Image (cartoon, rainbow, N blue to C red):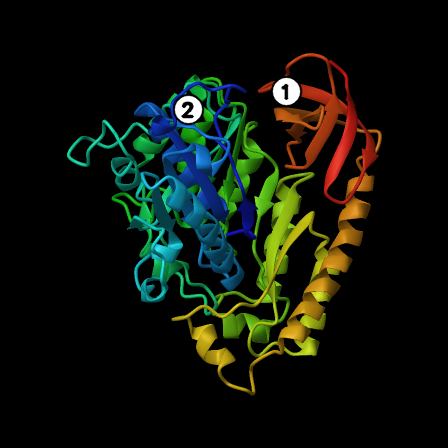
Amino acid sequence: MQDLLFIDKLSLAQRPDRDTTPRARRYYVWTVGCQMNVSDSERLEAALQNVGYSPAPRPEEASFIVLNSCSVRASAEERIFGKLGELVRIKREQPDTRVILWGCMVGPQNRSIFERQLPMVDHFVSPSAVDEVVALAPNSIYTLDEPALPVASWAHPPVSVHVPIQYGCNMTCAYCVIPLRRGHERSRPLDEIVDECRRIVARGAREITLLGQIVDSWGHDMPGRPQLPDLLEAVHEVPGLQRLRFLTSHPAWMTERLIATVARLPRCMPDINLPVQAGSDRVLKLMRRGYTIARYQALVARIRETIPGVSLTTDVIVGHPGETREDFAQTLALCEEIRFDKVHIAAFSARPGTLAAEQEADPALAVAEDEKESRRRELERLQERIATERSAGLLGQTVQALVEGENKGKWRGRSPNNKLVFFAHPDDLTGRLVPVRITQTSPWALQGQALA
């Protein structure tokens, strides 16, 4: 998945400034991790609201606190432990508060979590188990004996919603802990996904992002072996849907048919995330990624030929065990050549139980922490220059921004290429497509003037 999103997030639904719901019926959800965790939290919030709960702006105002955790990097786990430490005071002052630790830190084969003293946690719940979390809410009217919760039941959903189409992963990338935490890959049925998208859009969402650890592999484990293009075509026809995206792709799974489908369907956005992870074939082999740089370059060329103006983003890990300075130089050269719109950069962090953790234990393969950080900063500087140059090309152009909400007195939207766009306007434009002429650019966002 893409880089970690450290999110101290309130409700993803639209929330009134003054909510008179008593504390006993209020929740607080805090999410750390990738887009799959964001999706899980979106679904949890919809389910909690469906059983009579309202979001609280601060944890001390909630009777039910859920921390949705991540194990991809050690820093993510430490951030969760820090947040749990902050809850000790709340539990002491308000003993009726119920705290749930949810997500990948509680996934299968992670016994280390139970070696920590965490008296502030009342329950531990595995990733994506929305029903289990809701059943633990104080005074919940829901029980696990009932049918599955209608998780697409917001009264006012966000403009853009993540919809998971598969869980788990069958890949064996050396550095990745996801298969150990989320289990084997399980695809959701096409009809079930389309029905959820239809209900979400009917309640006001305008953009759907289909999520999977390896989203391109959706359907291979189901009867008839449907493919992601089949699902894109079905979701594309949902009435009221304006934009459709998907992530995260894998170079070994992306097909000619998928590329052609994105180019053909007008509501499929020209926005592809294609993690490369390293620019060296030798390191890719150590990572067990299953492709070569030549194959990756050919795939990028095919995408750009078929989808004009496509935005390409990628993920890179620097300092993987065995990566030399020469290997890293090849990563820099690849990024300079391809000129990605965005690169999600992570310094390698060994995760227990992975092959890469064993590799790092070998002094001949381990990369020093200060060297990892040096490489990360060097790649960040390169990508900032590239992103600055690519964004500058949009100066004076008009883009269609789908408005997601307000931010510091301006409206915040996203272009078809998924670039942030900010502009001023007196009206509430949430959920609308607005033409915006770009008047100022930066590496990570655009400023403009609304033309409507």
Q: Determine the image quadrant of residue 118.
A: bottom left
In this view, the residue farthest toward the bottom is 364
Comparing 403 with 74, the one in front is 74
Q: Determine the image quadrant of residue 364.
A: bottom right
Residue 225 pos. (x, y %): 31, 45
Residue 333 pos. (x, y %): 73, 65
What residue does disc 1 label?
A: 433
Residue 170 visible: no
Residue at (38%, 23%) from the top-left corner?
22
Q: Determine the image quadrant of residue 113.
A: bottom left
Residue 248 pos. (x, y %): 50, 48
Q: Earlier in the sequence, mark 1 or mark 2?
A: 2
Horizontal side of 258 relative to 326 (left or right) equals left
Residue at (37%, 39%) from the top-left corner?
94
Horizontal side of 47 relative to 252 (left or right) equals left
Residue 217 visible: yes
Label 2: how many residues lie within 10 Å, few (<14), some (14-19) or many (20+)? many
What residue does disc 2 label?
A: 200
Question: Helix, strand or loop at disc 2?
Answer: helix
Residue type highlighted by circle 2: Ile
Label 1: how many residues lie within 10 Å, few (<14), some (14-19) or many (20+)? some
Q: Are marks 1 and 2 in contact (CB under 8 Å)?
A: no
Q: Is residue 69 above or below residue 335?
A: above
Residue type highlighted by circle 1: Leu
